[in-house]
Image (cartoon, helix red, strand yellow):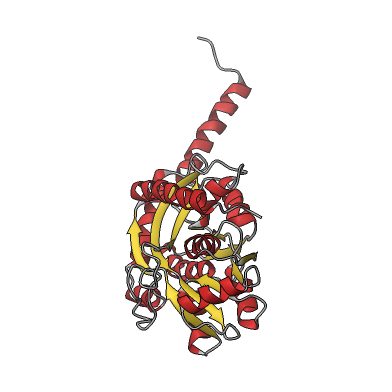
Amino acid sequence: MIRARPYRRIALAFAAALVAVLAVSPVAAQPYPNKPVRMIVPFAPGGATDIIARTVAQKLSDRLGQPVVIENKPGAGTTIGNAEVAKARPDGYTLLFAPTPFVISQVVYPTLPYDPKKDFAPVSLLATSPFILVTNTAVPAKTIAELVALAKAKPGTLTFCSAGNGTVPHLSGELFKLRAGVDIVHVPYKGGGPAIVDLVGGQVNMMFATPIEVSQHVQAGRLNVLGTTARKRLAAFPNVPTLDESGYPGFEVASFFGVLAPAGTPPEVVNRLAGDLAAVMDSPEVREKFAAQSAEGNVQGPDAFAKFLDAERDKWADIVKRSGAKVD
């Protein structure tokens, strides 16, 4: 009988012991999640996306039993934050809080540092939110008609701000210019928060903003609301007409908020996150907070969200083409 050499017996024994240890190891057996989760917000703090993301992150943290930490990565029409998530390890510990510019960037930028179809795994659509057109109190116009008349009387002098090139407020302004036949100047910022600070301060004249961003300034009398891009009047602003009512039929624009993970994230992790996010959005506290800001819950799981993203990209591609909007 041939006997195994001592060193081979030792190696086999060690391997068997290692397998046994790993089988019962807490590290190997730990389910997702077992450490904090990063949620990248591709805008500066203070804007609508950041506010909503923090509301969701707090509740998601309760569901996961781990901190969900917001990291703001603004710039380049959200592509800086998007790229960081695209390159992250696909283990469920880095997520992207994706607003509408995730799809708009695909049609306004000639190249991107990631593939929006191949580098991300859709997790869940959360909500949609219409916009309101606000002006600072130094602008004498109190209606859309008066604003258009003022812009036509002073072409190239009025300004509108946005959270950055290729964002929904930017393209909403470009669409307004097209439909109203006015010459107003776009001023991009790195996030909604800084844009609103300058809007309130009088450095810029107007903005298409989500109600959640500017409601406190409207209530305090620091901004005036002239119209909304919603299909019907908003409960929070019942006396404010829609753009459709103001003479621009079909002028309907809304932003969306969703969550994506890096491509390759295990399906069980994606489904776990989708389920927890659905539960978060079903929370009475979250529903009430969103409704108070005219944001409507619209939860869709991974497959439905993927189709939604394709449809949104096609819609914004058409708006960009018709308006001639470009990234400055």
Q: Is residue 18 above or below residue 257?
A: above
Q: Residue at x 38, y 77 (%)?
A: 241
Residue 92 shows in this picture = no
Q: Compare residues 172 and 97 and report the one nearer the observer.
A: 172
Indicate the position of residue 211 as horizontal and vertical percent values: 46, 75
Image height of 51 relative to 36, above or below: below
Residue 200: x percent and y percent? 61, 81
User: Between 316 and 106, which is closer to the camera in this rendering?
Assistant: 316
Q: Residue 223, percent across and down? A: 54, 83
In the rendered view, tell whether residue 25 sits above or below residue 172. above
Of all residues, the one furthest to the bottom in this rendering is 220
- Where, quadrant-wise, is the C terminus in this rendering? bottom right
Question: What residue is drawn where x is 39% and y is 55%?
Answer: 124
Q: Say if 158 sits above or below 279 in the image.
A: below
Q: Is residue 120 left or right of residue 76?
A: left
Q: Residue visible at 61% across and 62% down?
A: 164
Work out which residue is located at the far top of the displayed protein and give it: 1
Between residues 43 and 301, which one lies in front from this camera angle? 43
Left or right: 290, with 83 as reference point = left
The foreground one among 217 and 59 is: 217
Estimate the x, y position of residue 78 in percent, counting from the top left. 59, 56
Residue shown at 32% from the left, 68% from the top: 282
Please give left or right for residue 110 compared with residue 312 in the image. right
